[in-house]
Image: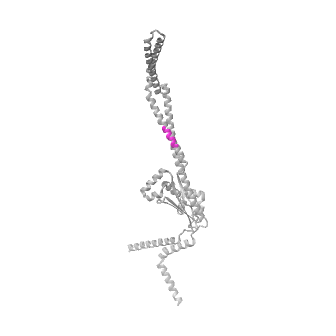
Amino acid sequence: MINADTPDTHSGMTAFLRRHAPVLIVVVLPTFLALVYYTLIASGQYESEAAFVVKDSRPASRASSAGSSMMMGGSMAMASGGAGLAENFAVNTYLKSHDAVGSLQKRLNLVGIYRRSDIDILSRLFYANPTPERLLWYYLNHIDVVFHEDTGVTTLDVRAFRPEDAKQIADELLKLGEERINEFNRLVAENTIKAADEEVTIAENRVKDVQHRMTAFRQRSGDVDPSKSSIVGISLIGQLETELAQSDTQLAQMLRNLNASSPQVLTLKQRIKALNEEIEAQRRLTQKTKGLYANIADYDELMMDREFAQEAYMTSASELETARATARQQQVYVVRVVEPNLPGMATYPRIFYMVLAVFVGSGLTFMIGRLLITGMREHAI
């Protein structure tokens, strides 16, 4: 009787398999293979976590950042504080770029880390000499760099197949971020000092130009200071006229008591004559130097240009010293909020979620395929 039922059992099993073959092939088989792979074959991945924030100590930047934060919300203004948002985004972009991958490859041999012999063949980096694009794609599948705008903190998660590898890569990424920020500081300082130095050079050349113009003016006019020369000439005539008036008064008094031919009177008359001659000579000299007075306006203009040029030079020189002092201070810097940890257990792959994802994906594929086949049959009829 048992032998009689055996063919029926086999035929029933065969019929069951034929009836449910699509489900078994599309849904059950991939889920079973995923379960076997993630449970028995897949290499465990260790995750090292770190966090950092980019701080900006520049007053203007803080004010600008605070103003922007107020527009986005008061909580962000309190949280982000002095964070340099532009620099933070720049560092995050850099850590996910070809440049960062190239630096890691030179310093740590990134390809060797992800091609160790104890890594399963599906998880390891397949190519021994991958192209930069393939290496970057694989690298991005094993790191996460997330900037939290509400706090200004960037979290860094690195996954590798050994705990020390994950920590080493995370440490090196933080160093690369710090080096990139230092490079930003260096470029900003160089550009600031260069601009200030150019302003000093321009101001210095302006001072020299005015000085050359004043020298040419003095050589052309034959006078060091026309304004002083005119004042000296006028004041000298005034003094001579004062002395002449005093001498005339003294002569009038003498003539009341002395004879006109007396030696004292004659001496005083000679002095008066000499004063008149000197006054006339000075007046003739003044008439000859009318061009001097015409140059006073040009001289005053040159003096004004020199004062402005010297003031501009002193201002630019002061700004240059300020720029150099500022350059000696680190304006933007990385603050490590959380140091990379040495993981103690593998956190990837997450077997349950991965198998569930395969099951759900396979199920959706089966349902979509079944709907398509059913629709095609109906149209065929």
Q: Does 318 lie within the magenta span?
A: yes
In magenta, the rendered stretch is 311-320
Q: Residue at x 45, y 58 (%)?
A: 76
Name the quarter where the C terminus is drawn: bottom left
Q: Does 334 lie within the magenta span?
A: no
The front one of 158 and 363 is: 158
Is residue 236 shown above or below 194? above
Which residue in the rendered view is the most extreme toward the bottom?
1
Is residue 165 shown above or below 222? below
Q: Percent x, y for residue 302?
A: 46, 32
Q: Residue at x 52, y 86 (%)?
A: 6
The mark total stands at 0
* Image quadrant where residue 368 sits: bottom left
Q: Percent x, y for residue 133?
A: 53, 59
Q: Percent x, y for residue 309?
A: 48, 36
143 relative position to 276: left or right: right
Is residue 305 shown above or below 157? above
